[in-house]
Image (tube, rainbow, N blue to C red):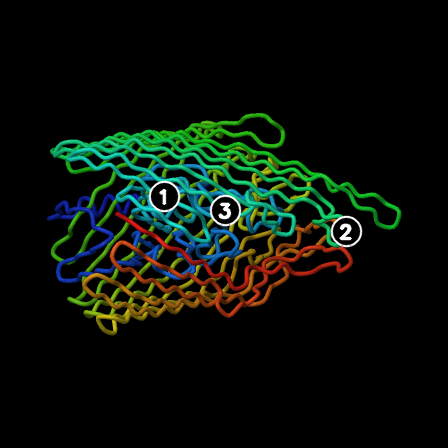
Amino acid sequence: MNNLYIVRFICICTICLYLTAYGNSQVIENDSLYTITIDSITYTATRIYDQHTVGLDRDDFLAMPGAFEDPSRLLLKFPGISTPNDQANAFIYHGMPSHFYQWQWNGAETVNPNHLANAGTITDISSINSGGVNALSGEIISRFDFRGTPHPRVRNAIAGVADLQTKSDQNYVKIGLIGLETGYLNQGEKWSLGGNFRYSFTGLLGDLGVDFGGEKIGFQDGYIEARYEDPRHSFLLAGLQGESYNRFTKPEDPTIIKEYQDITYEGDIHLLQAQYHKLIGTPFSLSATWSRRSDTRESVGSIGIDNVEYNLGTAFNSSLGKLSLGQEGSFLAWNWKLNQVYDYGTSKDKDQRSRWRLGFSIDRKFRIGTYTDIDLTLNQDYYTDMSAWAITPQLQVKSRINPHLQVGIQSGLNAQALPVVIFQQSLVRAWNNSAFLKINRGTLRVETEVFYHDIYDLVTLSGFGVGGLNVMNDIGAPLGGQLAINTDGSSYGTTLFIDKKVSDHIYLSSNASLFRASYNAAGEDILSQYNFGYTYNAQVGYKKEKKHSTFRVDLAYHQRGGTRTFPLSDTFPVYTQYDFSAGPTLVLPVYYRLDMKVLYQKGRSTWTLDIQNITNRLNAAYNYRELGIGETIQDQLGLLPVLSWKYGW
């Protein structure tokens, strides 16, 4: 633990102890994400953004444009968040890469819960935290919460956590261009049994013999849950199994590098969870969650250039799993949590690695006088493979200035261990800070924030092909490379969020962020790969409801600065190999797109048309080497319409 870390820890703990001892303190209840109230200030919204926290319910991600009912794709509609490639559902928070956040399922940490984890990646091998489509259907996700740092409920993550909360609550059939889907619910007085099954539309067409240029892409998943609840207790037992694949067969007359190869990618994912909650008296809960995924990719082929034969064959495989155990309760007005997470995995070298993360936290909320609320949290985690402690206090202060104005500060330490298949010698750590101001005047809500993430103990990969790649950039799949502590970094900036209900039928929303994300390399300040500089969003929606029908149209515009990318190495004439040593020095063009969604519901039927990128803007994804061209740019998705029909009962 370095001296700077000790100083920051002492500073936050001193503030916490002072506030805890402050006179006339009283315990208050947790704020709801739906209604946040301090005296006469009340914010209510179906789609909520509050202090870099996004909370979406099912109506949001089934109705908002450009998501294809995948809630993580909606995050780029909010301040400071964008995507590196719209072919996948990865998101970038304040310029920090996607491996700096963690996935949760009903509050428990899990592996990456996405199908087709190779989608949108430069290497076409699996990513750590994203994929083409979430394995948990939007029809069974009751709520999605992204908690960006600083936040008292963020553990083992530098940027934040994305929590998928599931519940089956209806019978339905659904037909659309994403897939064929059916849901089942058997509801009793105290118990219920439900689930759903999906089969991808492209997979069905492939089964019927439709050829997509030699490529077959598909996925399927099945989810089941059993619930019991009475006035005293509740139980949940849930599980999911999913599979995905992408197979490419080389044509007889190849013209580009990919067409000289036969490529097979396959992935599978398994989730299993049991939870118990005591509902009366002193609250208490128990949970156990097991998650596992495996990804394999193999390419076979060769190409001859200038009488030299180049072997294009590669093989990649990885298997990652987590067992998350949790207990929660309260004692003398303090809330406490115990968390034990067992991570294990194998990669190319076939050697399994593992770690236990043993965690304990306590928190308490206080009211100071009439106008100020204090939230204190102390998290402690021990990582067995590194013999490292992470003591991460969190502080939040919110104060009402007048009936329409609220101000506050948040500060906290965070630490994160990257996947076990990477040889990590120490935790990545960060001191995250923000200050915010919120105005609420009836139908108008304004929030502005400044933030500063001081990231240290950053590491750099030193394995073959990735030497010099700092983890403030996209490290892609866990390659088993060595990591060395050598630097620090930061991300800082400001955001503005405005939400206006114009009438009973029309709403307007707009937000913007300015930020700078960088890291230190040999004494030089290097702008990181996702230092977009700014993000901007504008949304407008119209909704008309009658007794038995609903019609709504939503438009959403997103713009950000260009991705920074690395120069290509000249070592191989047919391979795309990057020179990471100089940092990402090339800047791609500005990214922007306009999305639209139309929804019409009458009785039990719902029709939706979701169109991503209606202007057919070909945004740049990354640079790579192509046969006969040399260095060129890979485009992202153009116009993509998705039509679906659902019947529920």
- The quadrant of the picture occupied by the N terminus is top left
Q: Which mark is residue 131?
A: 3
Q: Which residue has dot 2 on it?
A: 253
Mark 1 in CB contact with mark 2 (< 8 angstroms): no
125 or 65: nearer the viewer: 65
Mark 1 Cα-neighbour bin, 10 Å: few <14, some 14–19, many ≥20: some
Amino acid type, label 1: Thr
312 or 348: nearer the viewer: 312
Q: Which of marks 3 and 1 is in front?
A: 1
> How far across and down, in percent of the image, does residue 649 sit?
25, 47
Disc 1/disc 2 C-alpha distance (Å): 42 Å
> Who's the residue at 39% across and 35% down the image?
240
Residue 29 seen in render: yes
> How far across and down, in percent of the image, does residue 592 sit?
50, 67
Q: Is residue 357 above or below residue 571?
A: above
State the residue lying farthest toward the bottom.
502
Q: Nearer the viewer, mark 3 or mark 2?
A: 2
Q: What element carries label 3?
A: loop
User: Which is more N-terminal, label 2 or label 1?
Assistant: 1
Amino acid type, label 2: Asp
Disc 3/disc 1 C-alpha distance (Å): 22 Å
User: Which is more N-terminal, label 2 or label 3?
Assistant: 3
> Who's the residue at 66% across and 50% down the image?
581
Mark 2 Cα-neighbour bin, 10 Å: few <14, some 14–19, many ≥20: few
Image quarter of residue 195:
top left
> Who's the residue at 57% across and 65% down the image?
618
Q: Which residue has dot 1 on it?
A: 182
Q: In this view, does 527 lie above or below 503?
A: above
